[in-house]
Image (spheres, rainbow, N blue to C red):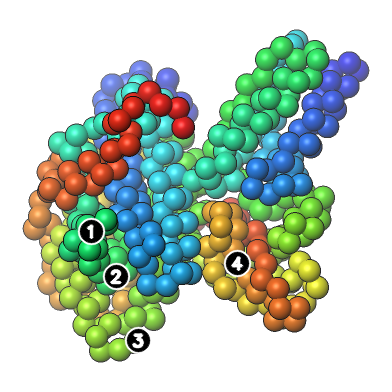
């Protein structure tokens, strides 16, 4: 199939546009919620340099979500800011595992957050993000392929950062090893949702927007095996449901309420 | 001939528009200006963003627009950021590198493999004896380093290069 060069061209084929917007929502909503959970560590990270690093990664990741929301805006889905702030949970396509709260308590009141969850989640997610972006650089939708190339050049630093944390912690104390393993086991039960492309996966492949799920998953597994000391023997699952299918938990509601609190006070304010 | 004159005039103006987070380093020297087009009294500028998540982009856009609209024959100017062209740290000019150093920011290393560790010389004393304190610095495009010779902390532009997928 020939490449689609612009939003106007994509709009001429309603089936192509529909599948493309589905994919863009998944990409945007994943980066958006991962960035939000990251932002909740501000001031709480294990040490000062980590606070600088993590907030820089988080800010940049939100920038990546903005890129995808802008592509959706060009396709006539509405303003990027509105897409980010105003869509209710039942319209969000992010994977459920990514919306999970950082731990017990809340940011303003006794945040007993778990660093092991964060290290495992960020590492597994950034590895998959890289695999997905590499596939997207060959997407039939040229504006998406361009955005993917741009993000890939920056994301390499994010992935390197989390890889370092995993390597150092799994080579550290017994407590660190046990905590990582327990969070990895938990992830194994939920992460399949992240690795999926949802109900329109076959059409995405047919329109050459991205390669098949099975290809992405195989590559991801090969990559993580190079870093993780132990990989769970059980098959990957999605036992909390499918976020790609707009199923979500209370955790997403909590995130959206907190994130939009200021925005909702005056939607017309100029920042 | 007159067109050439106009183009040079606009470029001179752009060379005075600094990055808001790197005073004394212009957007031209950072390699952010891709194309300047004129259509009678209207100017269209295409710029290349450095980092996608850079919050300074809106400010840069506003500053460029205002500076160009100060030129007496210009009636209006629009600025767009394009992702079609990739910014890389190789786009920083020799003048840009000189100004960065003056500001205590080391220019990016000349050769770099994505994801790997890298090092640069101290922008103050030129020593090779430096260490990486944090790959992530005060802005997305900078890292924090320390010079063990002159004992100054300093920053360096993070290398960003084209990442080709085979």
Residue A7 tag number: none
Give the residue pinned by disc 3. Answer: A171
Discs 1, 4: same chain: no
Give the residue pinned by disc 4. Answer: B144
Disc 3 and disc 2: Cα gap in Å?
Answer: 16 Å
Q: Residue at x 76, y 33 (%)?
A: B14
Give the residue pinned by disc 2. Answer: A115
Do labels 4 and 2 touch, CB within 8 Å? no
Estimate the x, y position of residue A233 in percent, counting from the top left. 15, 76
Which numbered mark, 3 or 2, is in the foreground of this view?
2
Disc 1 and disc 4: Cα gap in Å?
Answer: 32 Å
Characterize the local packing of mark 3: few (<14), some (14-19) or many (20 or more) Cα atoms within 10 angstroms. few
A184, above or below B80, in the image: below
SS class, disc 2: helix
Discs 3, 1: same chain: yes
The answer to which of marks 3 and 1 sits earlier in the sequence is 1
Which numbered mark, 2 or 1, is in the foreground of this view?
1
């Amino acid at each position: 199939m020939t490449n689609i060069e612009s939003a106007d061209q994509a709009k001429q084929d309603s089936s192509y546009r529909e599948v493309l917007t589905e994919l863009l929502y998944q990409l945007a909503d994943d980066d958006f919620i991962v960035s939000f959970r990251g932002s909740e560590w501000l001031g709480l990270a294990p040490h000062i340099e980590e606070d600088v690093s993590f907030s820089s990664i988080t800010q940049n990741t939100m920038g990546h979500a903005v890129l995808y929301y802008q592509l959706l805006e060009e396709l006539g889905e509405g303003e990027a800011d509105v897409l980010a702030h105003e869509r209710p949970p039942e319209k969000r396509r992010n994977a459920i595992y990514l919306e999970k709260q950082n731990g017990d308590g809340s940011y303003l009141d006794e945040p007993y957050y778990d660093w092991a969850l964060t290290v495992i989640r960020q590492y597994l997610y950034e590895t998959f993000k890289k695999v997905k972006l590499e596939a997207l650089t060959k997407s039939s939708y040229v504006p998406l392929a361009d955005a993917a190339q741009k993000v890939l050049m920056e994301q390499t630093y994010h992935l390197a950062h989390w890889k370092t944390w995993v390597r150092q912690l799994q080579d550290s104390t017994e407590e660190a090893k046990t905590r990582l393993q327990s969070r990895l086991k938990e992830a194994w039960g939920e992460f399949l949702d992240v690795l999926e492309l949802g109900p329109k996966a076959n059409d995405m492949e047919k329109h050459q927007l991205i390669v098949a799920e099975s290809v992405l998953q195989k590559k991801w597994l090969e990559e993580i095996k190079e870093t993780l000391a132990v990989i769970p023997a059980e098959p990957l699952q999605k036992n909390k449901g499918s976020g790609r299918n707009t199923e979500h938990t209370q955790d997403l509601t909590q995130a959206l309420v907190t994130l939009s609190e200021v925005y909702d006070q005056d939607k017309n304010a100029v920042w | 001939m007159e067109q050439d004159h106009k183009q040079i005039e606009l470029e001179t103006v752009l060379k005075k528009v600094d990055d808001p987070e790197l005073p004394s380093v212009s957007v031209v020297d950072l390699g952010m200006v891709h194309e300047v087009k004129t259509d009678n009294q209207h100017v269209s500028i295409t710029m290349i963003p450095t980092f996608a998540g850079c919050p300074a982009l809106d400010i840069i856009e506003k500053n460029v627009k205002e500076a160009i609209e100060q030129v007496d024959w210009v009636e209006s100017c629009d600025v767009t950021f394009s992702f079609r062209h990739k910014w890389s740290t190789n786009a920083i000019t020799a003048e840009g590198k000189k100004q960065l150093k003056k500001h205590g920011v080391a220019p990016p290393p000349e050769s770099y493999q994505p994801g790997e560790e890298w090092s640069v010389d101290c922008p103050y004393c030129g020593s090779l004896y430096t260490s990486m304190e944090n790959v992530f610095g005060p802005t997305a495009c900078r890292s924090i380093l320390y010079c063990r010779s002159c004992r100054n902390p300093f920053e360096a532009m993070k290398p960003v290069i084209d990442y080709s997928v085979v």
